[in-house]
Each structure stands twice: as structure tokens, then as C-alpha cells.
Image: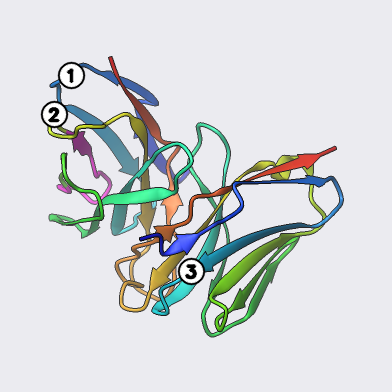
Amino acid sequence: DQQVKQNSPSLSVQEGRISILNCDYTNSMFDYFLWYKKYPAEGPTFLISISSIKDKNEDGRFTVFLNKSAKHLSLHIVPSQPGDSAVYFCAASARGSSNTGKLIFGQGTTLQVKP
Amino acid sequence: DGGITQSPKYLFRKEGQNVTLSCEQNLNHDAMYWYRQDPGQGLRLIYYSQIVNDFQKGDIAEGYSVSREKKESFPLTVTSAQKNPTAFYLCASKEQGGLNQPQHFGDGTRLSIL
């Protein structure tokens, strides 16, 4: 039962263009969502998060959008840079588990930004 | 320099052998977590601990054990009962209290069976 899904295993974009990574979820109890970036042989690095009371959160080149009715969130990277090439994981936390911090992760999307 | 240190980076185990993966943090975080990552899959939670001397099973705890005797340390033992131990293991920690704090990860240990 995959509660968090990233249906695109990979994405390739040109440097300077927008990268859009998508994530769908099924559990309506999820109320906190995060995006992590991961390079090979390293641990994931926290990028940006959003609470379910918001529909958008922006941090520099990174913006996360949340559509609760569609149970969908997306990460926009503008402009994309070659250093953004990595695996991106979407994660979610459910109401009641915000104190335990238990996260459910998607399968990841590999982003390649071409110079 | 605050962070999470996992050691060793690479670990090899013989069949039937228990091995222990180390995770140390100096972030003064109360909560710590162990995840497993397999190729093409997301991270799956093995065990977590919200406070010293207490820990809870995650989604895939069978064949693993943990201890939390000190705030800074949360070692994971992969026992011989774990039938498919080859994976990339990640440790994380998080501030407790407040709302919605992200987890921070170490750089992982890759375990392989000889």
C-alpha cells in the first residue's frame, strides 16, 4: 500500500528551465509534507516543507505547491542548475504523528539538469 | 560542526552474523530514526526513538534491534534473522516539540552480504 507516490522515476531538463517534480498521496490524514534531495552515497538533505494549512511555500529557487483536494504536491525549481541533478524524495507526516516525526516517503524521482 | 555521523560507510557481513551500525548525533535532538533504502524505492522506517531508553518499531522492524542508552547514540543491529539485509541504511534525528520539524540525515551505511 503505497501512501506516497512519485510516478515519474526520472526527469530531464535543460539548465535555466523550470523543473517540476510531482508527488501524489492517498492518506487524507497527512498534514505535513517535505521534499528531500539526495546525491549518490549520501544521506537526504532537507529542501523545503509545507503544512496542510498552506497551498504554497517558497524558498529561493524552490517552491512547493499543495493541492489538498487532489492530494497532490509539486516541487518547482526555477531556474534549474546542473548542481540540482539528484534524486528528489517527497515525504509526508500524518496528524497525530507530528510529534513522533514518522515520515512516509515516495520512491524518488531522479532529476538530470543538462548544461 | 553539528551533525549526524554514521559509521562505517561500508560494511560486509557473512551469512548468519549479526552486525551493528553506529549512529551518533551532536545536534541535541531527542528523536532518532533508522531507515532502509533499497534500489528504486523510498526510505522505509525500521525503528525510531523519541527519548532515551525508549524506542518503537517502524514498518519493517523484523530482523533488527536497537538501543537508546544515550541521547547522542542510536545503534542498529542487523541480526541473522534479517533475510535480506543488503541495503543502504540511513539514520536521522529531529527536534522534539513544536510543530513540523524536518528530520536530518546522516550519510548512510551500505551493508553487503559476503
Instruction: Identify the residue at horizontal 34%, vertical 55% (top origin).
Output: B28
Q: Chain of mark 1?
A: B
Instruction: Identify the residue at horizontal 43%, vertical 47% (top origin).
Output: B105
| Quarter of the figure with residue A70 | bottom right
* Main secondary structure type of the part rendered in magenta: loop
Q: Is residue B66 left or right of residue A96?
A: left
Same chain check for tags 3 and 2: no
Q: Is residue B42 above or below residue A103?
A: above
Return the residue nearer the eye: B24 or B33. B33
Q: Is residue B45 left or right of residue B43?
A: left
Q: Position of residue B69 (x, y in %)?
A: 14, 47
Q: Position of residue A99 (x, y in %)?
A: 32, 71
Q: Which label belongs to residue B15? A: 1
Q: Does B73 appear in magenta? A: yes
Q: On the image, numbered disc 2 is attached to which residue?
A: B80
Please name which of the two marks, 3 or 2, marks the residue nearer to the observer. Answer: 3
Instruction: Identify the residue at horizontal 18%, vertical 34% (top origin).
Output: B82
Give the distance between the C-alpha atoms of the residues marked 3 and 1, in whole angstroms.
38 Å
Q: On the image, numbered disc 3 is attached to which residue?
A: A25
Q: Position of residue B108 (x, y in %)?
A: 41, 36
Q: Position of residue A30 (x, y in %)?
A: 42, 75
Instruction: Identify the residue at horizontal 31%, vertical 78% (top origin).
Output: A96
Q: What amino acid type should be assigned to the residue bearing mark 1? A: Glu
Give the distance between the C-alpha atoms of the residues marked 3 and 2, in whole angstroms.
35 Å
The reply to whether callout 3 and callout 2 are in contact (CB within 8 Å) is no
Return the residue nearer the eye: B15 or A99. B15
Q: Is residue B44 above or below residue A4?
A: above
- Secondary structure, mark 3, is strand
Same chain check for tags 3 and 1: no
Region in magenta: B68-78
Q: Is residue A57 left or right of residue B95?
A: right
- Secondary structure, mark 2, is loop
